[in-house]
Image (tube, rainbow, N blue to C red):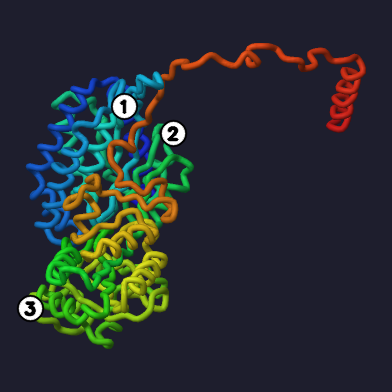
């Protein structure tokens, strides 16, 4: 079978799955809240119990990250996400304002096209399926080509459990024959109501170009500022642990450290004790060559890889126990590839004297490649913390935590999510952590509160008759237009 035949198979599969999902949705849209919650609870439990197996499948198929960390992400997607949405009303009247006499009524979107990344494949399938089914939507998953098997295994498990507990067949499905043409067919299909795209910039742009409603996620070039008021030991421990978590495959992981100059040397020593290795200028040059193409794109073979692997690939050795490679940088922009987002175990390092200079450097990093996404600050000075909160053009500013886990809502009070909106400045429709709230609409039933003004009920003094001369002018104009056409 030729590549063209494979493309046709993928297109046909997208059409069939979208049709099946639409038929299932018409049934599921009438489900009660009790039915919805029973199905979602069963899926969450099954996904949690299979977290280890699915995590290992994802690691083996993609070659990215750490199997145990993928298990943790699966558990987060199953348990934390479900706990955060289980009490949300998504059926019937979900709110009322007796004073304004308004009733709010939930209304599902329909069929969701869910594009999932290779970096977090199984956890994203679990999370997106739970929030979609909770909102009474159907979901068709379009996996990354390098994560087809693990995504299908996850979707099949969730679909089986859902059907056994009362959901219609076809409500949850996943493409097996993946191609660019097939994914485009799915996104553009007439039965698809909304696109939920998590992945690289080209994928997000494609989702927004369909003309359909779309939640897309931009890149996350996340700076971490460490202030002179910070708990340096904790900051060092968290930064290294967060950057090395699943080999930095979560888009909210720290990308560059911006250290306040008075504590920079101390922070460096503490990070080295945690497993950070500061490369020299020559080694940094080698890393630039293996991580990025001349155009600035990240080379897939280096995504989600351990520090020792990257060092060996670049041609130098690191001490045993090295978890993160750190490169001292002085510039931000295209001329410095290591100032970009690095979905692997490499950190940039900047030193700035004072929080104002640190603030400027962080904004520079964000504007270069992470507008709207996230930032983390380690500090105890509330004035500095609030200054960062007010000034940064991002929608998640986490404080004294691991950015990787804080931004997704595991170690903070943010809504648990694996799709993080970047707001208007980042090209997204929202800056929220995407959850079930975003996958249903709200109808409003509104009663009259006051009588209309009397003038609105009368015909008024407008001229109601047309004169014979006015009629003649209109007819003459129409005749002239007809003659022009002939």
Residue, x 13% and y 67% (percent of image)?
Answer: 234
| Residue 320's disc number | 3
Disc 2, SS: loop
The tally of labels here is 3
Residue contact between numbered discs 1 and 2, judged by CB atoms under 8 Å? no
Q: Is residue 458 left or right of residue 11?
A: right
Q: In this view, does 426 lie above or below 356?
A: above
Nearest to the eye among marks 3 and 2: give it. Answer: 3
Residue 339 image offset from top left, x and y in percent: 34, 73
Disc 3, SS: loop
Residue 412 image offset from top left, x and y in percent: 19, 51
Q: Name the residue under label 1.
A: 25
Front residue of this view, candidates 32 and 386: 386
Q: What distance separates the C-alpha of mark 1 from that of mark 2? A: 14 Å
Disc 3 packing (10 Å; few <14; some 14–19; many ≥20): few
Residue 115 image offset from top left, x and y in percent: 32, 47
Q: Which of marks 1 and 2 is nearer the N terminus?
A: 1
Disc 1, SS: helix
Residue, x 31% and y 36% (percent of image)?
Answer: 437
Q: Is residue 312 visible?
A: no
Q: What distance separates the C-alpha of mark 1 from that of mark 3? A: 53 Å
Quarter of the rendering containing residue 347: bottom left
Q: Earlier in the sequence, mark 1 or mark 3?
A: 1
Residue contact between numbered discs 3 and 2, judged by CB atoms under 8 Å? no
């Amino acid at each position: 079978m030729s590549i063209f035949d494979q493309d046709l198979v993928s297109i046909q599969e997208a059409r069939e799955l979208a049709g099946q999902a639409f038929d299932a949705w018409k049934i599921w849209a009438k489900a009660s809240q009790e039915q919805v919650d029973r199905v979602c609870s069963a899926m969450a439990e099954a996904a949690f119990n299979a977290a280890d197996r699915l995590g290992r499948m994802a690691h083996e198929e993609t070659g990215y990250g750490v199997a145990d960390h993928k298990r943790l992400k699966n558990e987060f997607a199953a348990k934390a996400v479900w706990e955060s949405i289980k009490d949300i009303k998504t059926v019937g009247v979900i709110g009322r304002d007796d004073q304004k006499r308004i009733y709010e009524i939930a209304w599902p979107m329909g069929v969701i096209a869910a594009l999932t990344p290779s970096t977090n494949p199984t956890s994203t399938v679990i999370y997106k399926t739970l929030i979609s089914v909770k909102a009474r939507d159907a979901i068709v998953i379009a996996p990354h080509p390098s994560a087809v098997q693990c995504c299908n295994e996850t979707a099949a498990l969730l679909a089986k459990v859902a059907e056994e507990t009362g959901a219609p067949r076809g409500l949850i499905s996943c493409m097996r024959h993946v191609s660019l043409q097939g994914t485009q067919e799915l996104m553009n299909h007439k039965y698809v109501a909304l696109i939920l795209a998590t992945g690289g910039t080209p994928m997000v742009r494609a989702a927004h170009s369909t003309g359909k409603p779309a939640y897309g996620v931009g890149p996350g070039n996340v700076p971490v500022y460490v202030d002179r008021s910070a708990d340096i030991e904790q900051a060092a421990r968290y930064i290294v642990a967060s950057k090395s978590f699943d080999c930095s495959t979560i888009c909210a992981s720290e990308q560059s450290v911006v250290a306040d100059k008075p504590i920079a040397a101390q922070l460096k020593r503490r990070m080295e004790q945690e497993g950070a290795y500061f490369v020299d200028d020559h080694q940094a040059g080698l890393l630039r060559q293996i991580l990025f193409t001349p155009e600035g794109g990240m080379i897939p073979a280096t995504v989600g890889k351990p520090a020792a692997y990257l060092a060996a690939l670049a041609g130098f050795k690191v001490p045993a126990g090295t978890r993160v490679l750190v490169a001292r940088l002085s510039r931000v922009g295209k001329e410095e590839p290591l100032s970009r987002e690095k979905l692997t175990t490499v950190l940039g390092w900047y030193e700035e004297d004072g929080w104002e200079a640190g603030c400027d450097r962080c904004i520079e990093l964000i504007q270069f490649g992470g507008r709207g996404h996230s930032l983390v600050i380690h500090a105890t000075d509330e004035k500095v913390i609030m200054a960062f909160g007010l000034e940064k053009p991002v929608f998640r500013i986490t404080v004294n935590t691991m950015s990787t886990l804080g931004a997704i809502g595991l170690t903070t009070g943010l809504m648990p999510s694996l799709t993080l909106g970047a707001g208007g400045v980042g090209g997204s429709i929202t800056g929220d952590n995407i959850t079930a709230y975003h996958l249903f609409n709200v109808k409003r039933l509104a009663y009259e509160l006051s009588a209309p003004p009397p003038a609105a009920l009368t015909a008024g003094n407008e001229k109601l008759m047309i004169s014979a001369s006015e009629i003649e002018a209109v007819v003459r104009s129409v005749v002239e237009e007809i003659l022009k056409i002939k």
